[in-house]
Amino acid sequence: MNGRTLVPIRPVFEAIGFRVAWDGTTNTAAMSNSQYVVNMQINNKTLHTSGWNDEMDVPPQIINGRTMVPIRTPMERIGYDVEWISETQTVKITRNIVREIETELFYKINQHRAMNNAPALIWHEVWLLPRVHIYLTLQ
């Protein structure tokens, strides 16, 4: 759709440990785990993630009875990298632990700011913070 690849939402989110629910009254898919709540509504470009809103390139659609979504925005919001491999027509989704930590830090900073009646940070402003590098050695 509009040059974007849509994928079925349920198997992708269940594969990474999310519970997936469908509300047929509002045509909304709700995905949740212990850290995030993600909501997407059919024909609506707005992605709701744990109180934050993002605009997707194209809205989720129902195709052949399945909820199909542009996967990049929701996956990146919850700390995954998304890569399109055109040679094999494959979407590669990889867990990005650094982005996951940055995202969690961003949410915690905004929660603290809200408790102190300070305006919320906009996502791009978080990149002004010093970059934290974590090195893990597998043994």
Image (cartoon, rainbow, N blue to C red):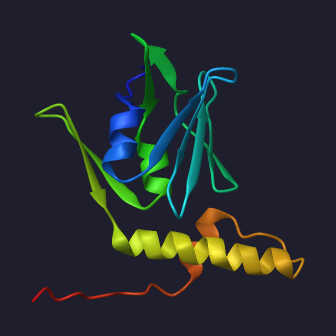
Left or right, 17 with reference to 45: left
- Residue 101: x and y in percent read 46, 76
Left or right, 34 with reference to 89: right
Q: How many callouts does the rendering have?
A: 0
The residue lying at 60 percent from left, 65 percent from top is 124
Quadrant the N terminus occupies: top left
Left or right, 39 with reference to 91: right
The residue most toward the top is 64
The residue most toward the right is 117
Q: Which residue is at the front of the view, 19 or 3?
A: 19
Q: From this view, report whether residue 23 is shown above or below residue 38.
A: above
Q: From this view, report whether residue 26 is shown above or below residue 11.
A: above
- Residue 120: x and y in percent read 77, 69
Quarter of image, res 136:
bottom left
The residue lying at 34 percent from left, 52 percent from top is 16
Q: Which residue is at the front of the view, 80 or 138?
A: 138
Quadrant the C terminus occupies: bottom left
- Residue 102: x and y in percent read 49, 75
Q: From this view, report whether residue 94 is shown above or below residue 25.
A: below
Quarter of image, res 132:
bottom left
The residue lying at 26 percent from left, 88 percent from top is 135
- Residue 26: x and y in percent read 69, 24
The residue lying at 63 percent from left, 71 percent from top is 107
